[in-house]
Amino acid sequence: MAHFTSESFQCSLLGMLIGRAEQLKNRILDKLLEPYELTAQQFKVLIIVALYGAETPADLCRSLCLDSGSMTRMLDRLEQKDLLTRARSESDRRQVRLVLTDAGKTLSNLLPQIGAEALNEMVGVLDKDELAMLEKLLTKVLVAAADPITLARIAAK
């Protein structure tokens, strides 16, 4: 269903609001992650590996919409911090598998609490019904776009 025209697009705040909300979430996460010397982007990588079972850099690239060069640099930094390692697959030597280190597992156990704190700070102005509606609407948009993480979350419920 088409909701926008080139004229109405110029008057709509929707695209800007979605982008600004993501930036706000990242700023809050960056602040909360400072004691762990982690960034919001690194948080997302660790969460996707730890909670959503991403096993390869390609999985992460698809999930985070990053190019392979950016992902390589991100994984280099996480390896330098001793949070994950890259290992060749036993079954296919061309593939690289991502494995959380012990330090990465320990930190990953803290990330849901940090994420909850960030979301509470971000959407604390909403009441319970407003929050449920926001989640329902965003889920509907992402399911229609066949977003793999959203679909996996729904399947796991």
Image: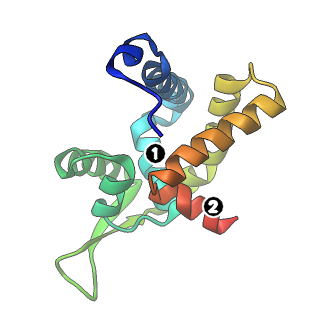
Q: Nearer the viewer, residue 108 or 23?
A: 23
Whole-angstrom CA distance, mark 1 to mark 2, is 19 Å
Near-viewer residue (93 or 103)? 93
Q: Is residue 14 visible?
A: yes
Report the label total.
2
Residue, far top: 11
Q: How far across and down, in percent of the image, does residue 68 sit?
A: 20, 52
Name the residue carrying label 1: 44
- Tell me which numbered mark, 1 or 2, is placed earlier along the sequence: 1
Q: In the rendered view, tell whether residue 100 sits above or below residue 119.
A: below
Q: Residue at x 82, y 33 (%)?
A: 129
Q: Which residue is mark 2?
A: 154
What residue type is disc 2 on?
Ile
Q: Residue furthest right?
A: 128
Specify whether 33 is left or right of 115. left
Camera-side residue of 123 and 55: 123
Q: Quadrant of the rendered structure where residue 59 is?
A: bottom left
- Local SS, label 2: helix
The image shows residue 46 at horizontal and vertical percentages of: 46, 52
Image coords of residue 39 (percent x, y)? 42, 34
Q: Position of residue 54 (x, y in %)?
A: 42, 64
Q: Which residue lies at the image location 26% right of the left edge and 49% below the top edge?
A: 71
Left or right, 95 with reference to 154: left
Describe the colour scheme in one phrase: rainbow
Residue visible at 32% across and 20% down? 6
Q: Is residue 32 left or right of residue 46?
A: right
Residue 38 appears in view: no
Taking 67 as reference, is 122 above or below it? above
Q: Residue furthest bottom?
A: 91
Circle 1 sits in a helix, a strand or a loop, which is it?
A: helix
Return the residue nearer the eye: 118 or 90: 118
Question: Mark 1 or mark 2, which is nearer to you?
Answer: 2
